[in-house]
Image: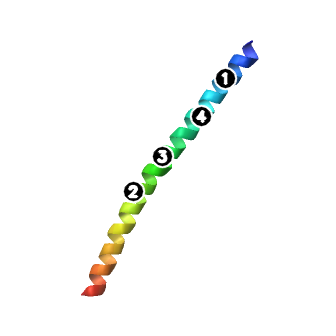
């Protein structure tokens, strides 16, 4: 019984970690995309001048 409950707890923790990592990566990806788009706009702006 104890082994089974421990497995359930470990699985729940693993799932929570995976969800956290996915959210963290997606948030960082959005930030990175925003920064890249701003840099790209800057490059275009400087290129036009």
Expressed as whole percent of the image width and height from the top left, the position of residue 3 reads 75, 18
**Dot placed on the residue nearer the N-terminal end, 3 or 1:** 1
Cβ atoms under marks 2 and 1 closer than 8 Å: no
Sequence-wise, the earlier of marks 4 and 2 is 4
User: Residue 24 appears at what percent x and percent y?
Assistant: 48, 46
Q: CA distance from mark 4 to mark 3?
A: 14 Å
In the structure shown, which secondary structural element does the residue marked by tag 3 occupy? helix
Foreground mark, 4 or 3?
A: 4
Q: Which residue is mark 1?
A: 8
CA gap, disc 3 and disc 2 = 11 Å
Earlier-in-chain disc, 4 versus 3:
4
Give the CA separation, mark 2 to mark 1.
34 Å
Mark 1 or mark 4: which comes first in sequence?
1
Mark 4, residue position: 15
Up-down relation of residue 14 to residue 1 (above or below): below
Q: Residues within 10 Å of mark 2 (few under 14, many from 20)?
A: few
Residue at the spot of label 2: 31
- The correct choice, above or below, for 28 with respect to 34 in the image is above
Q: Real-space Cα distance between discs 3 and 1? A: 24 Å
Residue identifier under label 3: 24
Q: Secondary structure at mark 4?
A: helix
Q: List x then y, in percent, for residue 23.
A: 48, 44
């Amino acid at each position: 019984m104890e082994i089974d409950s421990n497995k359930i707890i470990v699985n729940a923790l693993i799932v929570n970690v995976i969800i956290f990592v996915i959210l963290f990566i997606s948030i960082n990806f959005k930030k990175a995309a925003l920064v890249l788009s701003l840099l790209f706009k800057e490059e275009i702006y400087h290129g036009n001048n």
